Image: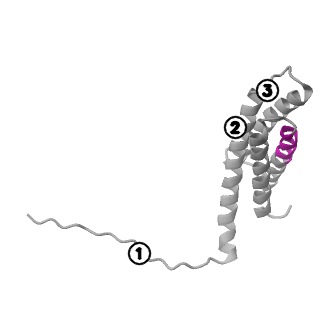
């Protein structure tokens, strides 16, 4: 009995750089995904940090807890908008992402004042940067 093995090879593709006009939609989608992913990570980090803080603790911790909860909610809402679950035009997306960026920056500043919250502060800053990167792919307002 003779058996033959079929050997498959991938066709060789020529690596070419697509024109800028063809790269723009790809960059838009990549930055949109990166922004949504950063929002998920930030929401998780903020919710976790807020859950560890005593609501009746020192004022700086109370503020950090409130900001962490708000940031988690804003990031979650932004992720839903970026996932297309809320059909908004580009202007609506821009407003949501700008709001998310602002809240993340403010939350990071508050977390900086709380010992042990550095990881959450970094997640907030990473999300704010991802929002900035995504906003750069949108058409000017």
State the image coordinates of residue 25 (x, y, percent, origin top left). 67, 66
Asked whether residue 86 is in view, the answer is no
* Circle 1/circle 3 CB separation < 8 Å: no
Q: Which residue is mark 2?
A: 44
Q: Earlier in the sequence, mark 2 or mark 1?
A: 1
State the image coordinates of residue 65 (x, y, percent, origin top left). 82, 30
Magenta stretch holds residue 108: yes
Q: CA distance from mark 1 to mark 3?
A: 56 Å
State the image coordinates of residue 96 (x, y, percent, origin top left). 80, 47
| Disc number for residue 11 | 1
Q: How many marks?
A: 3
Badge 3 density bin: few <14, some 14–19, many ≥20, Cα 10 Å: some
Residues rendered magenta in the picture? 102-112
Q: Which residue is mark 3?
A: 53
Asked whether residue 117 is in view, the answer is yes
Q: Earlier in the sequence, mark 1 or mark 3?
A: 1
| Disc number for residue 121 | none
Q: Residue at x 75, y 50 (%)?
A: 126
Q: Residue at x 84, y 64 (%)?
A: 140
- The quarter of the rendered structure image containing the N terminus is bottom left
State the image coordinates of residue 97 (x, y, percent, origin top left). 79, 50
Q: Is residue 133 above or below residue 76?
A: below
Q: CA distance from mark 2 to mark 1?
A: 42 Å
- The residue lying toward the viewer, choosing from 136 and 109, is 109
Mark toward the viewer: 3 or 2: 3
């Amino acid at each position: 009995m003779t058996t033959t093995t079929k050997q498959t090879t991938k066709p060789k593709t020529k690596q070419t750089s697509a024109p800028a006009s063809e790269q723009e939609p790809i960059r838009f989608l990549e930055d949109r995904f990166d922004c949504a992913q950063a929002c998920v990570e930030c929401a998780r980090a903020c919710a976790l940090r807020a859950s560890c803080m005593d609501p009746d603790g020192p004022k700086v911790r109370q503020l950090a807890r409130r900001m962490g909860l708000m940031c988690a909610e804003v990031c979650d809402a932004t992720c839903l908008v970026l996932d297309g679950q809320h059909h908004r035009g580009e202007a609506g997306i821009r407003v949501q992402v700008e709001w998310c960026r602002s809240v993340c920056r403010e939350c990071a500043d508050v977390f900086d004042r709380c010992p042990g919250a550095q990881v959450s502060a970094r997640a907030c800053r990473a999300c704010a940067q991802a929002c900035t990167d995504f906003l750069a792919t949108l058409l000017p307002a």
